[in-house]
Amino acid sequence: MYCPFCRYPDSRVIDSRTADDGAAIRRRRSCPQCGRRFTTQETVILMVAKRSGVTEPFTRDKIVRGVRRACQGRPVGEDKLAILAQQVEETIRARGLGEVPSHQVGLAILGPLRELDEVAYLRFASVYRGFESLADFEEEIAALRQGSRDAVQTAAGTEPA
């Protein structure tokens, strides 16, 4: 690790601690050349394999941008989008894979988005799943309605139909 102050090519680790709920390690370092201290943070880079075969690092910002389009005109704030992106990342990291297909990222978005806003979910699902007809929308709306009925019945203490 190069010293950011004098560019000496080595440093000594003074202290290591976990950060971001165990997703990263913060290290306090000291430069033997200039004696100054600095902090580094190590994280595992989660890679996403796209359909084209290209891999790129996972970024929450890309999730937020995609979902923001689906939420356009809906009462969904930026903080809710950030929380959704965090949930998606946690879901993907919990799988324990270093490289995840983009298809799995899309699937990880659908659940939290459905809970957040059903209209935004329907918009996102229509693009993600490639709806081609009105029947595709009708089937998805029927599934949404059935899910809502099941949730209401479960909350009321009765068995879903």
Image (tube, rainbow, N blue to C red):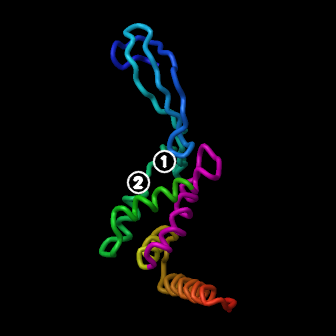
Residue 28: image location, x then y, percent:
47, 25
In depth, the one of 15 and 22 nearer the eye is 15
Using a 10 Å C-alpha cutoff, classify the residue at mark 1 as few (fewer than 14 neighbours), some (14 to 19) or many (20 or more).
some
Q: Is residue 130 magenta?
A: no
- Residue at the spot of label 1: 58
Q: In the structure shown, which secondary structural element does the residue marked by tag 2 occupy?
A: helix
Using a 10 Å C-alpha cutoff, classify the residue at mark 2 as few (fewer than 14 neighbours), some (14 to 19) or many (20 or more).
few
The overriding secondary structure of the stretch rendered in magenta is: helix
Q: In the structure shown, which secondary structural element does the residue marked by tag 1 occupy?
A: loop
The furthest residue to the left: 73
Q: Which mark is residue 118?
A: none
Q: Is residue 97 magenta?
A: yes
- Residue at the spot of label 2: 62
Residue 73: image location, x then y, percent:
30, 75
- Total marks in image: 2
Residue at image position (55%, 43%) is 23
In depth, the one of 63 and 54 nearer the eye is 63
Residue 156, relative to residue 94: is it above or below?
below
In the displayed structure, does residue 6 sit left or right of residue 154? left
Residue at image position (56%, 64%) is 107
**Which quadrant does the C terminus fall into?**
bottom right
Q: Amino acid at mark 2?
A: Lys
Q: Amino acid at mark 1?
A: Phe
In depth, the one of 29 and 67 nearer the eye is 29
Q: Residue 117, located in which quarter of the rendered image? A: bottom left
In depth, the one of 43 and 58 nearer the eye is 43
Residue 67, relative to residue 90: is it above or below?
below
Tell me if label 1 and label 2 are in contact, CB under 8 Å.
yes
Q: Bounds of the magenta span?
A: 91-118
